[in-house]
Amino acid sequence: MVKEQFRESHLSKKIDKISFGLQSSLDIRQQAHLNCVNFNLYEGSNHEAAANGVLDPKMGTSRKNMKCTTCGKQVQDCIGHFGYLDLKLPVFSCWVLQINYYYTPEYM
Ligand SMILES: [Zn+2]
């Protein structure tokens, strides 16, 4: 099965507004399928993705011959699943700071 291409004719109305925001840590945890607690990318002699790591196949697969271990679908059908990391210290995202900088009222 191939993913269907988005076609504008499927919409009954046009989107006139999109708003962006940050989710709370509780929302992120509730939507996630995996808490990434293993900081190793690979493990074992055959370099499989480490369980509970950021490459864990519970978040989807990028290989044609593997199935996602969360939904059981192959790469072309799996939509991907969220995971989250608990960081010990605050980390500022340059991407988010840049957006806030450009979209503050004095720059609009
Ligand atoms: Zn999946």
Image (cartoon, rainbow, N blue to C red):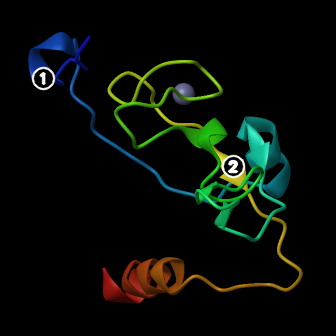
Q: Does 69 sit left or right of 91 as displayed?
A: left
Front-most of 2 and 10? 2
Q: Which mark, residue 8?
A: 1
**Coordinates of residue 40 in the picture (x, y in percent):** 72, 70
* Three-letter amino acid code of the residue under disc 2: Gly
**Coordinates of residue 8 in the picture (x, y in percent):** 12, 23
Mark 2 or mark 1, which is nearer the start of the sequence?
1
**Above/below status of 13 relative to 61:** above
**Above/below status of 95 relative to 13:** below
Q: Who's the residue at 27% across and 33% down the image?
A: 15
Ligand 1 is located in which of the four quadrants? top right
Furthest residue in direction front, as rendered: 45
Q: Who's the residue at 71% across and 85% down the image?
A: 91
Select label 1 or label 2 by which is in front.
2
* Element at label 2: strand
Distance Cα–Cα, label 1 vs label 2: 31 Å
The residue where tag 2 is placed is 83
